[in-house]
Amino acid sequence: MKPARIIVLGVAVVAAGAAAMLMSRPAAPPEKVVVERKAPVRTTDVLIAAADLPIGTTLKDGDLRWQPWPSDYVPPGSVTRQGGETLGDITGSIVRSGFLVGEPIRQEKLVKANSNAFMSAILPAGMRAVAISIDTRGSNTAGGFILPNDRVDIIRTYRDEEAAKLGGEGQSSETLLQNIRILAIGQNVQDKNGEKVVTGETATLEVSPAEAETLALAQKTGQLSLSLRSLADAGKAAETPEAKDDDANLTLIRYGISRQAARR
């Protein structure tokens, strides 16, 4: 055999042996990956808005829910379960400044039903709250069955000097305002669901600025009564009188006959 061929065969044998040795060696163990464990985040149960809550909303159970919140990032003034407050402590409150869904409920944005600011919180923008005197026995409030959130007509009864001169009874009545919302009777501002019939010395009405002026004058010139309207009228807008000059006339209906009379 030629020497060159012997050399080639020898190199091949050595290479094969080296490859076999490398393959027979155990594989190096994989490097261990060190995972750094983070400390668990402390959370606090925070009461949040379950839906968008606009200004004037009366809070119910379905409007609120508890949500775990990182304790280090709980907004100041938030209602928390750890603070000892419950849903019952918050329901019935009025939203004074609107909440977005998921926003923590904060006490400074709510008004309690017994708070001095409650009435201004439930008034829609641009409206006024005006109190009128009523009979405590309920004779001019539909027997005492008128309660907050009912709708009424305002009737004025006054002495008609012109009719008296003509030998008539001298008493006339007119409907001043229609479909007006009752805000409170006396100091009662709660809905009638589950409530007893109540009477009071005043009725607080939701009116426009023009209607407030009409009521202020009417109280000085006659006696006001409330005429209860059907629940079906609740969705209708209050019928607001148009702005009139001091010399404008009213259309009065008495004994089935209409006539024009000067405003008093």
Image: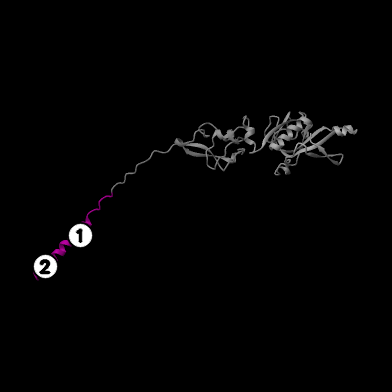
* Position in image of residue 53 (x %, y %): 58, 41
Mark 1 neighbour class, 10 Å CA radius: few under 14, some 14 to 19, many 20 or more: few
What residue would you read off at disc 2?
6
Q: How did the renderer colour the structure?
A: one colour
Residue ID at (10%, 68%): 4
| Left or right, residue 243 beside residue 102 | right
* Position in image of residue 250 (x %, y %): 80, 39
Which of the two discs, 2 and 1, labels the residue nearer the N terminus?
Answer: 2
> Which one is in front, 244 or 44?
244
> Which one is in front, 179 or 73?
179
Residue type (three-letter) at the residue carrying disc 2: Ile
Does residue 71 lie above or below 21 as drawn? above
What residue would you read off at disc 1?
19
Q: Which residues are magenta?
A: 1-30
| Left or right, residue 127 beside residue 47 | right
Indicate the secondary structure of the residue bearing disc 1.
helix
Secondary structure mainly formed by the magenta segment? helix
